[in-house]
Amino acid sequence: MLRKQALLLVNIGQLLTLHSVSGKVGPRRGRELREVGIIHDGAVLCVGGKIVSVGTTRAALRDPWLNKSRRRFLEIDCRGKVVLPGFVDSHTHPVFVHPRLVDFEKRIEGASYEQIASAGGGIRSSLEAVRAASSSELTEKVSDFLRQTASYGTTTVEAKSGYGLTRDSEIKSLKAILQTAIAWPGTVVPTFLGAHVVPKEFEGRSQKYVESVCKDMVPVVARRKLARFVDVFCDKGAFNGREMEQVFEAAAAHHLEVRAHVCQLSPTPLAPFLRFHPASFDHMDHVSDADISTLAAHDTVATLVPGANYFLGLATYPPARKLIDAGVPVALATDFNPGTSPTISMPMAMSLACTHMKMLPTEAISAATINGAWALRLADRKGSIEPGKDADLAIFDVRDFREVPYWFGANRCYRTILNGTILPEI
Ligand code: NIG
Ligand code: FE
């Protein structure tokens, strides 16, 4: 049985609080991404799944109340390790059954993502198994994924449906996410991605499929409270801007919030969609300069997923420097999925952001924590280590926070605390 007991972490070599120096409300932009609020020799007290106080170990041990109640806390001596806010992985697709190994080999032999998709591989080739799967099979897949992400320091996960693409299989996928979330100590945010691709039975009739998403699926998702967000894959080979608008309109009519996959394979003008107040635009490889300027004046987060570029073997990556330098709020996520990014590791996404997108380690950490929280509209509870926020922390067995993206491919996470529950148990 997992315990949510009072925790006192002491002797933290570097405690990155992500406390905002300016005190400005909103996602972090530009130079703000470099402010990670370091406390040396830090301490954190968590009670009832919430952070109660944050400071130095010296100050904590001098506090008379804390000293008196000390034996009621589980005390964790961090012995100089680094503590970060738990990662917020704001873009994942965990409800699938099989890895796509044939596509993997075809790509090694030279085929592109789009060629594979139009030859019957890609997203469409994952549909049959999800449609046939039992609810418990899907629940097991999602919980395996959550267990693994936590071991890499992730405490909050956005999880999309999108590999069923019929009303029933999308409901089954979202229920698997919700069912898993109940038993999970961390936080899970479900997203409905019925508009992932046009399934085979609607081939050549994408408008009919969009109608089915808008009329048969979105209303039931909203009525049964199966998801917080509605997502759309707007790109070549998936849905166009007009179709994205229709899905956004349906979501808005049913009081669901929106986010979208955009500009991954081809450019799409984004400004017209800002009237729907999307929480996030994800991928952004082909975003235009005009849209970069426009986005700098909005709170829609640009969520970058360099794992997809890495796994597709692309030479180019999303223009993180341009976005950050223009003042667009940027988040990082894994995009965990069987086709383009089979990684559960936020430290790996951060490492790719540093090496291929020229983000500094401080910027990558802000993007993986507080801005991920903004991308899910959970920044009042998640993404920083501050009194009143959820007790979501990741302890890394390193001396310097820059080692987290530096040791790529290795897992240096020692313990993860999810809403006050420590994993693995001590
Ligand atoms: O984010 N782009 C659309 N969706 C996924 C890919 C899903 C898949 O290939 O299964 C992505 O890259
Ligand atoms: Fe995705």
Image (cartoon, rainbow, N blue to C red):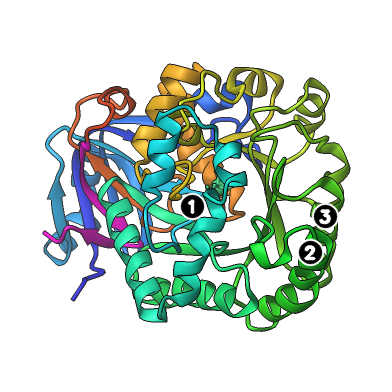
Q: Position of residue 394 (x, y in %)?
A: 29, 45
First in residue order: circle 2 vs circle 3: 2
Q: Which residue is mark 3?
A: 243
Quarter of the figure that contains the N terminus? bottom left
**In the image shown, does 70 or 170 lie closer to the viewer?**
170
Q: Which residue is mark 2?
A: 210
Magenta region includes residue 419: yes
The local secondary structure at tag 3 comes to: helix
Give the residue drawn at x 42%, y 18%.
355
- Whole-Å distance between the Cαs marked 1 and 2? 22 Å
Q: Is residue 61 left or right of residue 290?
A: left
- Whole-Å distance between the Cαs marked 1 and 3? 22 Å
Give the residue drawn at x 33%, y 27%.
405
Q: Is residue 283 above or below residue 190?
A: above
Three-letter code, disc 2 = Val
Three-letter code, disc 3 = Glu
Nearest-to-viewer mark from 1 and 3: 3
**In the image shown, does 389 or 294 lie closer to the viewer?**
294
Q: Is residue 319 above or below residue 415?
A: above
Q: Is residue 367 left or right of residue 71?
A: right
Q: Position of residue 18 (x, y in %)?
A: 45, 37
Q: Position of residue 70 (x, y in %)?
A: 15, 59
First in residue order: circle 1 vs circle 3: 1
Is the residue under label 3 in contact with that under label 2 (CB below 8 Å)? yes
**Stretch in magenta:** 411-426
Give the residue drawn at x 78%, y 51%.
277
**For disc 1, does the CB lie below 8 Å from ligand 2?**
yes
**In the image shown, does 43 or 140 lie closer to the viewer?**
140
Is the residue under label 2 in contact with that under label 1 (CB below 8 Å)? no
The local secondary structure at tag 2 comes to: helix
Three-letter code, disc 1 = Thr
Question: Which disc is residue 92 wearing?
Answer: 1
